[in-house]
Each structure stands twice: as C-alpha cells, then as structure tokens.
Image (spheres, helix red, strand yellow):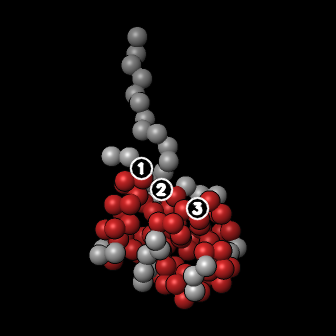
C-alpha cells in the first residue's frame, strides 16, 4: 500500500476514532504554533472559515486531504507525518556482516 493510500485511510478512520482525531489535531496545532500561523491566517490560505481551522486544531473535526496538502506545503512539513505521525524516513535495512 502506498503512502497516499495509507494517508487517506488514516484520515478516513479518524472521522470515527476520537484518539486519531486528537493526535492529528495535536500535530496540526503544534506545527501551526511553531510556524506562528494563526487559525485566521490558515483559514484565509485554505478559503475556509476560521471556525473550521479551530475545530481541526481542537480535534473536533478533521480537515480534508486537500487542506492537509496545502497546510503541509505551506508549513514545509511532510503531509504523511501530519496525517499519521509516521516519519517520512525509509525503513531501515540491516547491514549484513561479510
């Protein structure tokens, strides 16, 4: 399964799973705070209401994938990490001693 499929699946499950929603909200809020971006500013970028962004940051609702993509690009973070919490690093390959 590709990263895009994993990301989409994670977002779809988060609508029903409160813990996933809260985890996404925490990453989103932390990233926006670190970048000094207000909910109003993000709402303006995304052409949504400030309430929508505040709901995302509190874990009440989850942004659609297109919003995640724009947020990730604008804040220079990996969209997969923002959605799932998993780093973008490739899996480790153990070296074999010769």
Mark 1, residues whose alpha carbon is within 10 Å: few (<14), some, or many (≥20)? few
Residue 36, quarter of picture? bottom right
Tell me: 75 left or right of 21. Answer: right
Residue drawn at x 40%, y 58% as measured from the top left? 7
Residue 83: image location, x then y, percent? 45, 63
Report the disc number at residue 3. Answer: 1
**Mark 2 or mark 1, which is nearer the start of the sequence?**
1
Looking at the image, can residue 85 be seen? yes
- For the question of whether residue 19 can be seen, the reply is no
Residue placed under numbered mark 3 in the picture: 72
Q: Which residue is mark 2?
A: 80
For residue 55, side relative to residue 76 (left or right): left
Secondary structure at badge 3 equals: helix
Q: CA distance from mark 1 to mark 2?
A: 7 Å
In the foreground, 33 or 78 = 78
Identify the residue at image location x=34%, y=75%: 15
Mark 3, Cα crowd under 10 Å, few <14 / some 14-19 / many 20+, is many
Which of the two discs, 1 and 3, labels the residue nearer the N terminus?
A: 1
The mark that comes first in sequence, 3 or 2, is: 3
Contact (Cβ within 8 Å) of mark 1 with mark 2 = yes
Up the image or down, 12 lies above or below 2; here it is below
- Measured along the vertical axis of the image, is residue 34 above or below residue 93? below
What distance separates the C-alpha of mark 1 from that of mark 3?
15 Å
Q: Name the side, left or right, on which 95 lies relative to 44.
A: left
Q: Secondary structure at mark 1?
A: helix
Neighbours of disc 2 within 10 Å: few (<14), some (14-19), many (20+): many
- Quarter of the figure that contains the C terminus: top left
Please tell me whether mark 2 sits on a helix, a strand or a loop: helix
Task: Choose between 20 and 49: the one closer to the eye.
Answer: 49
């Amino acid at each position: 399964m590709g990263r895009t499929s994993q990301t989409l699946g994670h977002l779809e499950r988060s609508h029903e799973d409160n813990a996933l929603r809260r985890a996404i909200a925490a990453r989103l809020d932390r990233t926006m705070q670190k970048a000094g971006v207000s909910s109003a500013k993000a709402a303006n970028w995304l052409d949504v209401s400030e309430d929508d962004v505040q709901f995302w940051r509190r874990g009440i609702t989850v942004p659609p994938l297109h919003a995640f993509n724009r947020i990730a690009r604008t804040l220079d973070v990996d969209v997969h990490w923002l959605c799932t919490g998993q780093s973008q690093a490739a899996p480790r390959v153990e070296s074999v001693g010769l």
